[in-house]
Amino acid sequence: MNLSVRIKTYALCTLCLCILNIAQAQKKAASLKFKVIAFYTGKEDQAHISFVHEANKWFPAMAKKYNFTYDSTNNWKNLNTAFLAKYKVVIFLDTRPEDSLQRVAFEKYMKGGGGWMGFHFSAFALNQSAVPQNWDWYHNTFLGSGEYGSNTWRPTSAILKVEGKNHPAMKGLGSTFKASPNEWYRWQNDITKNPDIQILASIDPVSFPLGTGPKQSEIWHSGYYPVVWANKNYKMVYFNIGHNDIDYEHKTNKDLSRTFGNPAEDKLILSTLLWLGNTK
């Protein structure tokens, strides 16, 4: 084969390889089901920081396995209409936006059909605290829970009763499952009386007494406590999980528990995310 033919053959092979690579890249891009953006603050409470670190390892692993993309940011200025337009699902890992323009952009995103899941402290609001209830649409209309009421302490596991068995988020969970240790919240509003709210899981009474104290008010002996719920008017699910147990007493701040790695909770979170990302 002379030099000219070899050059032409090499050029042709190179061109074919480039075309193949482009086709594979396009196929991969086309197969991506949806994009997820998680917002977090990652400050103040080591239990919340621990959860955020866990989440930002677990979600990327799930993204590779289930073929979606996961991005995360602690820059809440990105919570604007142009930025959100790139994503199918928004996650609040530990806090909520405080800026009024960011709040307007998020409300517009949700009313436009965007998907959302929030964890634990993202629903917290308490007047006369650093996080006052000053966002009625979010706390009363969207979440329905209103202000924070009280909590259990220390973080302990609980048996959760599955209520919304027909909701896609609860697929395959059975009637009950054991949750990882958590600080459980009670809320000001009774969401059982809110027709827009669908409760998906609650504390099963077999969990009582729940909490270890030392304050007696931090140990629940009875009552009804929703833990996971959805708002029928939006594509959203809120989880009251996301507070790991931390060694505060010995000032090591070491993790004493994890949220992810619990098969039932992992299934719940993943089913919710895939539902949010794959529905119109």
Image (cartoon, grey):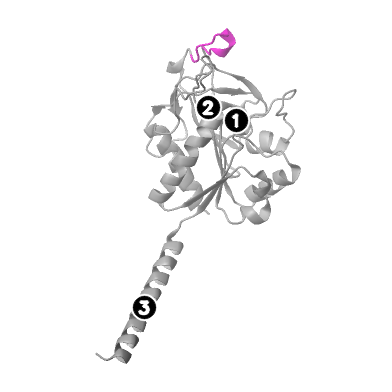
Q: Nearer the viewer, residue 65 or 178?
A: 65
Of mark 2 and mark 1, the one earlier in the sequence is 1
Q: Which mark is residue 14?
A: 3
Q: Nearer the viewer, residue 175 or 41?
A: 41
Secondary element under disc 1, as helix, strand or loop, is: helix
Can residue 199 be seen in the rendering of this structure? Answer: no
User: Dots 2 and 1: beta carbons under 8 Å?
Assistant: yes
Q: Nearer the viewer, residue 146 or 31?
A: 31
Q: Is 187 one of the magenta-colored residues? A: no
* On screen, residue 206 above or below 92: above
Q: CA distance from mark 3 to mark 2?
A: 54 Å
The magenta stretch spans which residues? 210-221
Residue shown at 40% from the left, 74% from the top: 18
Q: Main secondary structure of the magenta part?
A: loop
* On screen, residue 91 above or below 16: above
Of mark 1 and mark 3, the one earlier in the sequence is 3
Q: Nearer the viewer, residue 264 or 32?
A: 32
Q: Which mark is residue 243?
A: 2
Q: Amino acid at mark 2?
A: His
Q: Amino acid at mark 3?
A: Thr
Packing grade of label 1 (10 A; few <14, some 14-19, many >=20) is: many
Foreground mark, 3 or 2?
Answer: 3
User: Dots 3 and 2: beta carbons under 8 Å?
Assistant: no
Position of 15 compared to 130: left or right? left
* On screen, residue 226 above or below 1: above
Of mark 3 and mark 2, the one earlier in the sequence is 3
Foreground mark, 1 or 3?
Answer: 3
Residue shown at 53% from the left, 12% from the top: 219
Q: Which residue is mark 1?
A: 121
